[in-house]
Amino acid sequence: MIIELLTALLYAGLPVAFISFGMIYWAQKKGYPIVKESDDVSEDLTEELTEELTEDLDDITNDPNTTKSGKQSKNKHIVFDKWTTFGGGYYGIMALVTYAHVELLELWQAFSAFESIQHFINQLSLGFFIGLIIEAIKNLVTAFIWFTYWDEFLPINSPWLWLGASYAGYYAGEKLMEYRLNTK
């Protein structure tokens, strides 16, 4: 049990802590709105969010970078968009990490099948790229159910222990970021 706890902390807790610290730090630096899981939810949260959304809508409509269709010409970062697509917070971090892991493995398998650059160029086709897109969509589903994915790659005997270790890592990363912001 102690060996598995140490393994879970090493393979799940520490990486999730570093990634959550990095994501929250990066989002704070870019000015993206982050609602941390450790925040107390106030009764006026709906009112606060409505005010914030109204201010954002006013900013967008008065922004010179806004096109006629109402979309801003400068986009948010793709990683932040994926994180918030997955729900943000702990679940979003775990889904984002899972998606990145699955995608990197898929891309490695797809491109390592080619023997040379010439073979790669000869095999390029519309079907190859359509296959990559279809795999990306399938990987998105896998990312949403990340808790069923990781036991293929990690020596998980006690799933609740691993879940606790990864959440502890997320919480530690979030608190470290909060501490870093408060010490400035």
Image: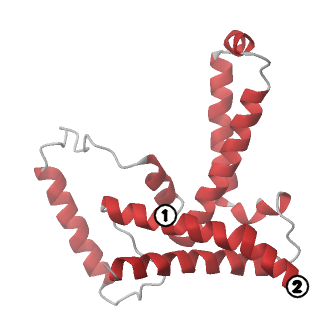
Q: Position of residue 150 (x, y in %)?
A: 77, 61
Q: Nearer the viewer, residue 177 or 159?
A: 177
Q: Residue at x 67, y 12 (%)?
A: 121
Q: Nearer the viewer, residue 111 or 61?
A: 111
Q: Is residue 63 left or right of residue 50?
A: left
Q: Work out whether 117 lies above or below 19.
A: above
Kindly identify the amino acid type of the residue bearing the numbered disc 1.
Gly
Q: Residue at x 79, y 78 (%)?
A: 6
Image-quadrant location for residue 143: bottom right
User: Disc number at residue 22?
Assistant: 1
Q: Is residue 23 left or right of residue 167?
A: left
Q: Is residue 16 left or right of residue 22?
A: right
Q: Residue at x 45, y 47 (%)?
A: 78
Q: Is residue 176 left or right of residue 29?
A: right
Give the CA distance from mark 1 to mark 2: 30 Å
Q: Position of residue 58 (x, y in %)?
A: 14, 59
Q: Work out whether 139 lies above or below 113.
A: below
Quarter of the C terminus within the rendering: bottom left
User: Disc number at residue 1?
Assistant: 2
Q: Secondary structure at mark 2?
A: loop
